[in-house]
Image (cartoon, rainbow, N blue to C red):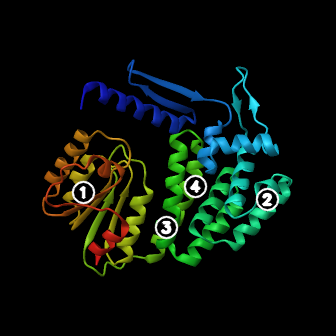
Amino acid sequence: MSTGVKFVLFIIYIFKIKQKYTGQRFRISFNTHDNIIRFKMKTEGYSIKDLETLSGIKAHTIRIWEKRYDLLNPERTETNIRYYTDDDLKRMLNVSLLVRNGYKISKVATWNEEAIKQTVLDVAHSKNSEEGYIDQLLLFMVNFDNVGFTALVNEIIEKHGIEVAVQRIFFALFERIGTFWQVGSIFPAQEHYITNFIRQKLIAAIDALGITGQKGKTILFYLPEEELHELSLLFYSYLAANSGYNVIYLGQLVPFADLEKLRSHVELDYIFTAFISPILKEDLEDYLERLKALYRQQMVFITGRQVHEHSPKLPRNFKLVKDYREFKKYLG
């Protein structure tokens, strides 16, 4: 990989971290003709592209609905650029949900906000598909509707169980949210709200299992020093605990030196870690080599977006976990 490409990846990574923890939104683009990285901070409202991304309705269709039905009334910046408010976004999400469920836009556009919201609730109660759940959860997220979000999450878990709920609904929700965050269509507080809520549910489910250790095997779960995305690790640790394994859970941002110290204190049979945040392929492979040197006798499970994207060369005692079903087979 060239120095120039490394630099581009590094700069993008830094700005993504800044965006995540300052609440500032940036658009990142790379012009291949003049080798200039451009960062544009998003300061006002939502663009029509944001509405398209969040609602699933094409920008062209949104413009038609504006002209034909007066569905939205975008405001303009001092430089005459159109933008949409939070209320516009909420209306668009509600309308798109109704249209996807068979309602005619010509009819929905004539309703007032109260009628739209009530019909959305009616649809929510009658439609319990996975996609329907995700649409409803997104609406609650945008509105920070804690009562509605809590009730629906509890309903989903009660109906499907925590394992199916996480894998088929909550993770699909996070994939949607990840796309929205990447294009700057949501702000960090919305993502954090959802993440911490589901995290609490997973921790409660793990706590309810207790510690049996009936398998007689111990698995260490941890994330490397620069890795913050904990939900998938929590879910995999739940699967291991539910299968009777003794789980040592260290969570996020674990220094490598701590792994070295831990080796002399705990006898481990398996190691599980994940790589989700951006990392260069050579840095990933270097880390895996260090991990191999530390744990030569144990099976090391690895997963995460970066592993799938880079396809690093894996030591013999390392196993790539493609999904939770595969991991459950290993657990037996």
Whole-angstrom CA distance, mark 4 to mark 2, is: 21 Å
Q: Mark 1 or 2 closer to N-term?
A: 2
Residue assigned mark 3? 168
Could you tell me how many numbered marks the image carries? 4
User: In terms of depth relative to the viewer, which is nearer, 176 or 296?
Assistant: 176
Specify the amino acid type for callout 4. Ile
Q: Is residue 136 left or right of residue 164?
A: right
Q: Secondary structure at mark 2?
A: helix
Q: Which residue in the structure is indicated by mark 4?
A: 194
Label 3: few (<14), some or many (≥20) within 10 Å? few
Q: Give the quarter of the figure containing the C terminus.
A: bottom left
For marks 4 and 1, the one nearer the N-term is: 4
The residue wearing badge 2 is: 117
As rendered, which of 33 and 120 lies closer to the eye? 33
Residue position marked by numbered label 1 in the rendering: 262
Distance CA(mark 4)–CA(mark 1): 32 Å
- Residue 64 place in picture, x, y as percent: 73, 42
Residue sitting at x 17%, y 57%: 295
Identify the mark nearer the N-term, 3 or 2.
Answer: 2
**Which structural element holds mark 1?**
helix
Q: Is residue 274 above or below residue 30?
A: below
